[in-house]
């Protein structure tokens, strides 16, 4: 596993962040946490993650907006984006994909599924 | 001309003639005399002047008395007989002539009375038949009325000008609130009534838009011809309107039916429920995610550090508890199920954008092109609110970017329809767009009292500002709507088509009435709308501080007295009342203590009388009362005014009394509740209706004629 691969987890709910962080670290990724959209944008420049696990319902700037910003930034637009959201309707999923996400995972998810998607995207 | 004036004309002309004849005879006689006879005659005249003068004076006086006798016995009674015969012939067939004057005239009056009796008899049998037919019609009408009253929805039928032809009780409750209640808090209420405009109750733009939509649907020969819109009424209540056109036999729009549902409650419940379900799903998903992820980690990594394992177990416990609480909380609220009442109607995206284009062209003077590759793309929209949202956005972009040319695009990508507003220029920054979302939708001076966000939320729509990179060739605002499900059945209401003959139940004459003609003067008296009113006051001197204590009014529309649409309000005069006035109207000071003041009542009355001709008996007095309150109340009564006293005098100059009782008596009207404002107003209205038919026989047909006739009598009465 490539040690330099970096993942940013953006979620305001610590009870999901803890297991996600554990899971990603167990799979050999370097992980940082952001609890809001603003914090995520902030970290993006310094941390330069390869992939973002992004919640949609965030306080302040929401996940879809972060997604759009990443896609418009020439330096960051290659970042892989996985939306991890409790919004589970088809319409929500379609909107997320329309905003340029690489994958959309609905909560609750299986650990295996999310790890598989992340590995696949970072191959 | 008054009878007394006639006499003096008659007397002076006769007298003048007699004097002229006497003078001529004297001159001819004088010429035929020779000088000796002349000298003799002059001498006789000089010596016996007293006798001659007395004879002449007595002779002339005799002639005077004779003339007066002839006038009072032959001429004046003849004029009265003529007027009273006309009265029998028009307003009051039960009236009989009081015989007076010469024997011939008394006989003539007797003959006329006998004729009237016989006519009465014949009419009686005809009337009996009419009565029977009327009763039958009345029964049918009652069935219709009962049926209308039982409908849970409000129903209003209007002609193409927006004048109300028919409404039911629910419509009245919904649109006008409790119209006859007397609390001052309802000062700003509008009135619903036959012949009134619906536009005073429902914003005109909404209805015009609905009618435009119907016209377009008719042109496209669509099956579902109904247009729906949502209207925010009094006290923030939310109504869903269905507009159904009424077409003539040749399919022209002659009116429309509004069916009104109060959806305030449903919508409140629905939005609460929506929020609740949303939160429930989101939070249970989040909890389930934490639990699942944690437990899977424990299972997958059995050799993890004990500290780490503890953390995961605590997460599982806490989230499981949270999930239980969440479900407990939601169960009660979930019990009520609710369906949405703010309807989204399936429309072709192209048609919708075309409406936006037209309105933007009319209202914002903005040039819009439409680029829709696939004309079959459909969206589900509330036409008016989403259209207003588009106009709002176009207007805002225009101001922010200085653009006056836009392209509207529609494209469907799987289950989403993107409606794009494109223009040459910079994209709208995200934070600005978020501020716009919070704003109430307003286009030019017109406001739709919901925010952009609310309207978008209701459409399950999202809005994005897209940059030039994403949308090459300019900036773009994208509104993403979910595409409609493949097969959604639409409720279809049938169109009402009037038969060639007129329906039997109601008076639909207003269908044919010309629009709001500014040339009121040329309108026929029997076609105008009137507010007949009366005031009771603390005394008879408005200029010396006497105040109004009661206003009563009824409406006449298309020649019908609408007894159910009345205005009846006591007023606290905030001053002492004289005993004499209490004796006249019977209103005690205690009855007025809790009543609203004139400052509260007059604006309401002003709205009640809006757009009608004011009618009162001895209107000058009542108008003076109203005008003295103009500065205090801020309302001005500029309606045209007619006075039943002057009109009565214009057609019955021979009658000396024109007070309300005497006129009513002459016309066979009995007054119920004399000296209550409403009772007097009703009597005045009945008198007025009879007067209108008599006026027509005298060649007075229009408002202008009536005013001129009144003016003449006014001066006539003033002079003598």
Image (cartoon, coloured by chain):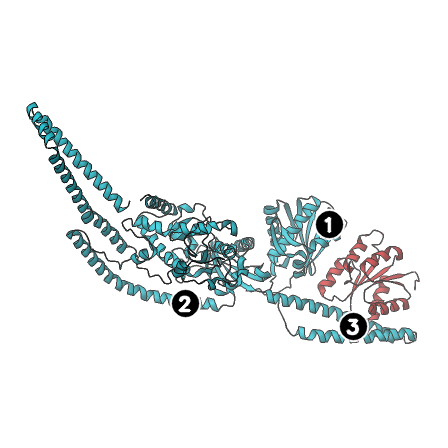
Chain colours: A red, B cyan
Q: Which residue is mark 1?
A: B428
Per the image, label 1 sits on a secondary structure element best described as loop
Q: Chain of mark 3?
A: B
Q: Residue B265's spot in the image, x, y percent?
A: 60, 67
Q: Is residue B196 left or right of residue B657?
A: right
Q: CA distance from mark 2 to mark 3?
A: 63 Å
Q: Is residue B456 above or below residue B52?
A: below
Q: Which mark is residue B288?
A: 3
**Residue B472 image offset from top left, x and y in percent:** 74, 48
Task: Quadrant for residue A24, please give it.
Answer: bottom right
Element at label 2: helix
Task: Provide the chain ID for the residue under circle 2.
Answer: B
User: Left of B640 or right of it: where is B395?
Assistant: right
- CB within 8 Å, label 1 to label 2: no
Q: Quadrant of the N terminus of chain B?
A: top left
Q: Residue pushed farthest top?
A: B35
Residue drawn at x 29%, y 55% is B90
Q: Residues within 10 Å of mark 1 (few under 14, many from 20)?
A: some
Labels 2 and 3: the sequence-earlier one: 2
Disc number at residue B406? none
Is B159 displayed left or right of B488 in the figure? left
The Cα atoms of the two marked residues, 1 and 3, are separated by: 39 Å
Instruction: Give the chain letter at badge 1.
Output: B
Query: What residue sits 84% from the left and 54% below the top?
Result: A76
Question: Where is residue B292, by image quadrant?
Answer: bottom right
* Residue highlighted by disc 2: B142
Disc 1 and disc 3 on one polypeptide chain: yes
* Discs 1/2, front: 2
Q: Position of residue B542 (x, y in %)?
A: 44, 51
Q: Would you say residue B375 is visible in this rendering?
A: no
């Amino acid at each position: 596993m490539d040690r330099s691969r970096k993942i940013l987890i953006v979620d305001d709910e610590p009870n999901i962040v803890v297991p996600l962080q554990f899971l990603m670290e167990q799979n050999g990724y370097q992980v940082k946490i952001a609890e809001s959209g603003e914090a995520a944008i902030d970290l993006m420049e310094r941390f330069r993650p390869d992939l973002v696990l992004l919640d949609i319902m965030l306080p302040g700037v929401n996940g879809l907006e972060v997604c759009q910003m990443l896609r418009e930034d020439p330096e960051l637009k290659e970042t892989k984006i996985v939306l991890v959201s409790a919004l589970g309707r088809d319409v929500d999923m379609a909107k997320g994909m329309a905003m340029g996400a690489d994958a959309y995972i609905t909560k609750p998810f299986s650990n295996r599924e999310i790890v598989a998607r992340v590995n696949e995207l970072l191959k | 001309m008054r009878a007394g004036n006639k006499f003096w004309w008659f007397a002076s002309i006769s007298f003048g003639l007699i004097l002229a004849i006497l003078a001529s005879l004297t001159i001819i006689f004088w010429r035929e005399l020779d000088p000796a006879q002349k000298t003799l005659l002059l001498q006789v005249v000089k010596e016996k002047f007293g006798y001659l003068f007395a004879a002449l004076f007595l002779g002339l006086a005799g002639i005077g008395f004779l003339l007066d006798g002839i006038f009072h016995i032959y001429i004046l009674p003849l004029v009265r007989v003529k007027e009273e015969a006309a009265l029998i012939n028009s307003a009051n067939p039960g009236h009989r002539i009081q015989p007076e004057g010469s024997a011939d005239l008394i006989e003539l009056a007797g003959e006329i009375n006998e004729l009237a009796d016989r006519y009465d008899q014949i009419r009686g049998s005809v009337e009996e038949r009419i009565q029977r037919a009327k009763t039958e019609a009345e029964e049918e009408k009652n069935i219709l009325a009962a049926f209308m009253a039982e409908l849970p929805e409000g129903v209003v039928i209007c002609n193409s000008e927006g004048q109300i032809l028919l409404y039911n009780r629910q419509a009245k409750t919904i649109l006008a609130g409790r119209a006859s209640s007397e609390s001052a808090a309802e000062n700003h209420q509008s009135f619903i009534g036959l012949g009134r405009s619906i536009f005073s109750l429902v914003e005109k733009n909404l209805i015009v838009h609905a009618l435009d939509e119907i016209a377009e649907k008719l042109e496209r020969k669509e099956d579902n011809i109904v247009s729906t819109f949502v209207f925010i009424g009094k006290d923030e209540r939310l109504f869903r309107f269905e507009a159904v056109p009424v077409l003539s036999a040749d399919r022209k729009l002659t009116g429309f039916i509004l069916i009104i549902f109060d959806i305030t409650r449903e919508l409140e419940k629905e939005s609460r429920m929506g929020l609740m379900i949303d939160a429930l799903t989101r939070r249970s998903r989040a909890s389930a995610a934490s639990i699942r992820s944690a437990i899977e980690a424990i299972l997958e990594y059995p050799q993890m550090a004990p500290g780490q394992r503890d953390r995961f177990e605590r997460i599982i416990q806490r989230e499981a508890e949270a999930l239980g609480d969440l479900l407990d909380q939601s169960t009660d609220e979930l019990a009520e199920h609710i369906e949405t009442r703010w309807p989204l109607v399936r429309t072709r995206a192209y048609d919708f954008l075309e409406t936006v284009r037209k309105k933007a062209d009319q209202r914002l003077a903005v040039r819009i092109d439409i680029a829709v590759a696939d004309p079959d793309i459909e969206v589900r929209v509330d036409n008016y609110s989403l259209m207003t949202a588009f106009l709002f956005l176009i207007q805002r972009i225009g101001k922010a970017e200085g653009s006056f040319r836009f392209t509207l695009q529609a494209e469907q990508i799987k289950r989403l329809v993107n409606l794009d507003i494109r223009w040459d220029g910079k994209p709208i920054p995200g934070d600005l767009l978020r501020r716009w979302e919070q704003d109430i939708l307003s286009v030019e001076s017109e406001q739709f009292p919901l925010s952009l966000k609310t309207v978008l939320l209701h459409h399950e729509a999202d809005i994005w500002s897209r940059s030039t990179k994403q949308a090459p060739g300019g900036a773009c605002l994208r509104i993403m709507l979910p595409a409609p499900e493949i097969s959604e059945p639409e409720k279809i209401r049938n169109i009402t088509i009037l038969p060639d003959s007129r329906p039997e139940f109601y008076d639909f004459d207003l269908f044919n009435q010309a629009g709001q003609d500014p040339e009121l003067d040329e309108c026929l008296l029997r076609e105008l709308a009137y507010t007949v009113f009366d005031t009771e006051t603390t005394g008879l001197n408005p200029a010396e501080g006497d105040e109004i204590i009661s206003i009563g009014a009824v409406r006449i529309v298309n020649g019908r007295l609408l007894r159910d649409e009345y205005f009846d309000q006591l007023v606290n005069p905030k001053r002492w009342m004289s005993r004499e006035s209490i004796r006249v109207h019977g209103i005690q000071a205690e009855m007025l203590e809790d009543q609203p003041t004139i400052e509260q009542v007059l604006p309401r009355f002003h709205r009640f009388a809006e757009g009608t001709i004011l009618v009162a008996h001895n209107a000058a007095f009542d108008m003076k009362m109203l005008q003295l309150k103009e500065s205090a109340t801020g309302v001005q009564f500029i309606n045209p005014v007619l006075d039943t006293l002057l009109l009565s005098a214009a057609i019955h100059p021979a009658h000396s009394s024109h007070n309300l009782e005497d006129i009513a008596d002459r016309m066979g009207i009995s007054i119920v509740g004399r000296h209550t404002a409403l009772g007097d107003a009703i009597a005045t209205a009945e008198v007025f209706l009879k007067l209108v038919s008599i006026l027509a026989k005298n060649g007075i047909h229009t408002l202008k004629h009536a005013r001129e006739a009144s003016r003449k009598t006014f001066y006539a009465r003033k002079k003598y």
